Image (cartoon, coloured by chain):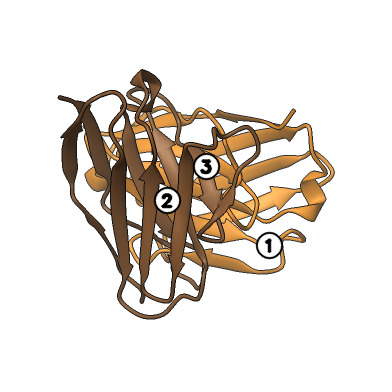
Amino acid sequence: EVQLLESGGALVQPGGSLRVSCAASGFTFSSYAMSWVRQGPGRGLEWVSTVSDDGGTTYYADSVKGRFTISRDNSKNTLYLQMNSLRAEDTAIYYCIEGYYFDYWGQGTLVTVSS
Amino acid sequence: DIQLTQSPSSLSASVGDRVTITCRASQGIRNDLGWYQQKPGKAPKRLIYRASTLHGGVPSRFSGSGSGTEFTLTISSLQPEDFATYYCLQHNSYPRAFGQGTKVEIK
């Protein structure tokens, strides 16, 4: 059974940094692209970033480019999202997702950016 | 960038009704489209990928069709557990894009 467990969500001040993680199990992590999608309060889904199976290729939404960095450690079956220069509009639940076709989703971790 | 437009944004329906949701892409995306269901307070779940392939374990009352720029999600006989918000997603190119969502409510 595929399991994706996000962690690291917190209350952060504007301009601050945070790293969220996603521990994966139940599938061969190193064989799948992984992504982050977020959902602001009362809002729809917004794709944030995707990393290839080997970590060599990354993609970002314009809204986070230059501020967020996606990475993975295939030896630890873990996906990361480093978020810098956080803004109020980054407040959201961040979901970790497995696969090119967004096959399975974690339960999400809440990031709140507020002073 | 490819944009997706879903319609309607919300609908009211009764148990047993046939429900159809449409997703239009701003340019052709072959069959590179998925559908997701989200219930309040829960993470989204995939229903369909490649426009018409049912995700494992998804009831057969759900079906998807379309290619190019126009796609539909159909629920053949709405069940109580189907009241939720539905999103389409294009996985043809980056940046990935979701539709704005369709909320299916009880009439």
- Residue B35: x and y in percent read 45, 49
- The label nearer to you, 3 versus 2, is 3
Is A32 left, or right, of A98 in this rendering? right
Quadrant into which the C terminus of chain A falls: top left
Query: Toward which corner of the image does residue A22 lie, by quadrant?
Result: top right
Q: Mark 1 sits on what residue?
A: A52
- Residue B49: x and y in percent read 55, 54
**Mark 2–mark 1 CB contact (< 8 Å):** no
Q: Secondary structure at mark 2?
A: loop
Q: Please tell me whether residue A73 is drawn above or below residue B51 in the rendered image.
A: above
- The label nearer to you, 1 versus 3, is 3
Query: Toward which corner of the image does residue A58 lie, by quadrant?
Result: bottom right
Q: Mark 2 sits on what residue?
A: A84
Q: Amino acid at mark 3?
A: Arg
Quadrant into which the N terminus of chain A falls: top right
Q: Secondary structure at mark 1?
A: loop
Q: Please tell me whether residue A106 is drawn above or below residue B81 in the rendered image.
A: below
Q: Please tell me whether residue A88 is drawn above or below residue A47 in the rendered image.
A: above
Is label 2 on the same chain as label 1? yes
- How packed is label 2: few (under 14 Cα within 10 Å), some, or many (20 or more)? some
Query: Toward which corner of the image does residue A3 lie, by quadrant?
Result: top right
Which chain is displayed in orange in the rendered image? A
Which chain is displayed in brown in the rendered image? B
Is A54 left, or right, of B70 in this rendering? right
Q: Mark 3 sits on what residue?
A: B46
Per the model, the C-alpha gap separating discs 1 and 3 is: 20 Å
Is A49 left, or right, of B103 in this rendering? right
Chain of the residue under label 2: A
